[in-house]
Amino acid sequence: MDFKDVVVSRRSMRAYDDSKTVTKDQIEEIVKMASYAPSWKNSQTARYYAVLDKDKCQEFATKCLPEFNIRNSKGAAYIVTSFVPGNSGFDTAKNEATNECGDGWGYYDLGLNNENLLLAAKEAGLDTLVMGIRDAKAIREEIGIPDEEIIVSVIAIGYGTKDATMPKRKDISEILHFV
Ligand SMILES: Cc1cc2nc3c(=O)[nH]c(=O)nc-3n(C[C@H](O)[C@H](O)[C@H](O)COP(=O)(O)O)c2cc1C
């Protein structure tokens, strides 16, 4: 698949084949692609926690996701994405935010990483669903994520069983301004 095809054909998938398993090797390769994203002063604050085992995935989903996200991600593996705050966007020597965005830059860097992750998954024949509606407290307890990390999204990853259509995008004239 060329780059444009990967970008355009990636869809949020809400139906997965439960008989297929995502492997550790696949996740390692995809997260490696995520790690090539740029980050504030190369601070690389994104962190990933992968749940692959089918029974563990079911337990994770039951404890950490709302009903509609459980249903839509059934059969997929999960990647919890988080970041270490106080680095990206900060002058760490002075322990000061460099500008008004503060830890917003940590979210920004994680998003850059995660888009690489979604596209690398698509290129590898896998589908994904980013889930922002999740229970961060339950996730922290279930996975044992350190208190200093900010938990952001859960990404379902697996083999989609449906053709998803692209939700309508805004026209370029609505989002791009030449000044
Ligand atoms: C930050 C973020 C959070 C999202 N959270 C959810 C979610 O909790 N559940 C869900 O079904 N989709 C979720 N989505 C998927 C969006 O609804 C989807 O990306 C959007 O409708 C565009 O569709 P597409 O990904 O197929 O292009 C989320 C997407 C993003 C980027």
Image (cartoon, grey):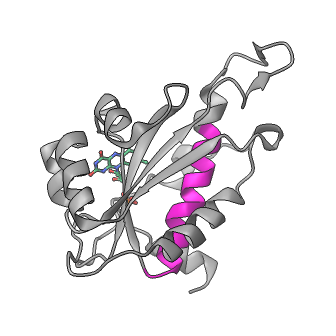
The span shown in magenta is 108-125
- Location of residue 19 (image quadrant): bottom left
Q: Nearer the viewer, residue 169 or 71?
A: 71
Q: Is residue 160 above or below residue 108?
A: below
| Horizontal side, residue 137 vs residue 171: left or right | left
Q: Is residue 24 above or below residue 109?
A: below
In percent of width and height, residue 170 lies at 44, 52
In percent of width and height, residue 6 lies at 53, 76
Q: Main secondary structure of the magenta part?
A: helix
- Location of residue 140 (image quadrant): top left
Q: Nearer the viewer, residue 55 or 106?
A: 55
Please identify the quadrant where the N terminus is shown: bottom right
| Residue depicted at x 25% and y 41% | 64
Please identify the quadrant where the C terminus is shown: top right
In percent of width and height, residue 86 lies at 68, 23
| Residue depicted at x 30% and y 66% | 53
